[in-house]
Image (cartoon, grey):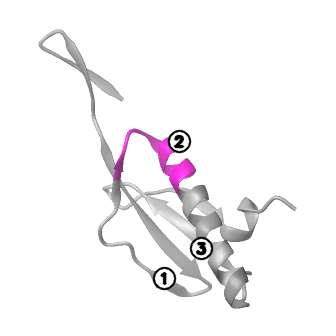
Amino acid sequence: MSEQLDGRRSWVMTRYFFHIRDGDDLVEDTEGVELQDHASAREEAIRAAREMLAEKLLLGERIDGELFEVTDESGRVVETIPFKSVMKI
């Protein structure tokens, strides 16, 4: 999203949070990341999920069931990304 300020265009950033859900358990992201839009948040979640999956595979850990719940600053879920959905098999 952009706004006109004094004839110049500036981007309004939104803080997104990447909570990890595993069944009923939720690990909340308390810091978040400022990004331009939902598409950027989705790309960030996919990249992070791939990194986390790679680590879990190396450690021989279970990879089924976890997902990112991406929320905006208001706490609204804007994306749900299951970790296993980011693998290319």
Magenta range is: 34-44
Front: mark 2 or 3: 3
Question: Quick one: label 1, few (<14), some, or many (20+) residues within 10 Å?
Answer: some
- Residue 47 locus on image (x, y percent): 58, 57
Query: Which residue ends up furthest to the right in the rendered image?
Result: 89
Mark 1 or 3, nearer chain start: 1
Query: What residue is pinned by disc 3?
Result: 52
Front-lying residue, 75 or 34: 34
At numbered mark 3, what does the secondary structure look like: helix, strand or loop? helix
Query: What residue is pinned by disc 1?
Result: 26
Q: Is residue 42 magenta?
A: yes
Query: Which residue ends up furthest to the left in the rendered image?
Result: 6
Query: What residue is pinned by disc 2?
Result: 39
Quadrant in which the C terminus is drawn: bottom right
Q: Are marks 1 and 2 in contact (CB under 8 Å)?
A: no
- Residue 57 locus on image (x, y percent): 72, 81
Rounded to the nearest whole Å, what is the CA distance between mark 2 and mark 3? Answer: 20 Å
